[in-house]
Amino acid sequence: MSSNFDFLQGNEDSMGYFRAANFLEQEYAIGNYASELTSARKIAENVVKFILDQNYMDNDATFAQNLKAVKYHHLLNQQLVDLLYAIKQPGNEASHTLEQYNKQDGVAALQHLSAI
């Protein structure tokens, strides 16, 4: 089965991201949207940690603090920072509530993640 994230398979550093994104697509396919949003948030958090690490910066803080550091130090352009925030908020909500999510929420998470 082909994945929207197949391009991540070519590099050892990105294989973990590929496996997580592939699982996220499977969650979407079975309609497990809350879990998908949580998984997308987890991937985004690890992307932010990787960016900080590649810039020799501490990445042991919370996702919110790490994302603020990326934004403050202009390590990514504003469009990418906005996408990361767009993934973070619903992922946090899905992790901490019993809300039901729908296909549109799932599509948005996939689109945001693939844009990063």
Image (tube, rainbow, N blue to C red):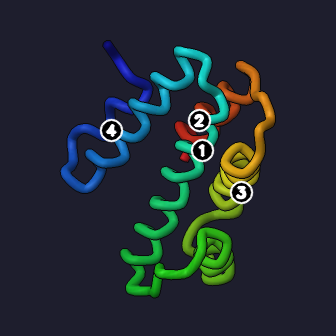
Q: Residue at x 39, y 30 (%)?
A: 22
Q: Position of residue 31 (x, y in %)?
A: 61, 17
Q: Are marks 4 and 2 in contact (CB under 8 Å)?
A: no
Q: Nearer the viewer, mark 4 or mark 2?
A: 2
Q: Residue at x 44, y 26 (%)?
A: 4
Mark 3 crowdedness (10 Å alpha carbons): few <14, some 14-19, many ≥20 = some
Establish if 96 lies above or below 52: above
Where is mark 3, residue-wise? 85
Say which mark, if any, is on residue 19.
4
| Distance between the alpha carbons at the discs numbered 1 and 4 | 15 Å
Mark 1 crowdedness (10 Å alpha carbons): few <14, some 14-19, many ≥20 = many
Where is mark 1, residue-wise? 38
Q: Position of residue 78 (x, y in %)?
A: 70, 62
Establish if 104 lies above or below 97: above
Q: Position of residue 36 (x, y in %)?
A: 58, 34
Q: Earlier in the sequence, mark 2 or mark 3?
A: 2
Q: Is residue 11 visible?
A: yes
Task: Say left or right for 95 vs 40.
Answer: right
What amino acid is found at the position of numbered circle 1 in the picture?
Answer: Thr
What amino acid is found at the position of numbered circle 3 in the picture?
Answer: Tyr
Establish if 18 lies above or below 3: below
Q: Quadrant of the N terminus?
A: top left
- Between 98 and 91, the one lying in front of the other is 98
Q: What is the quadrant of residue 102 in the picture?
A: top right
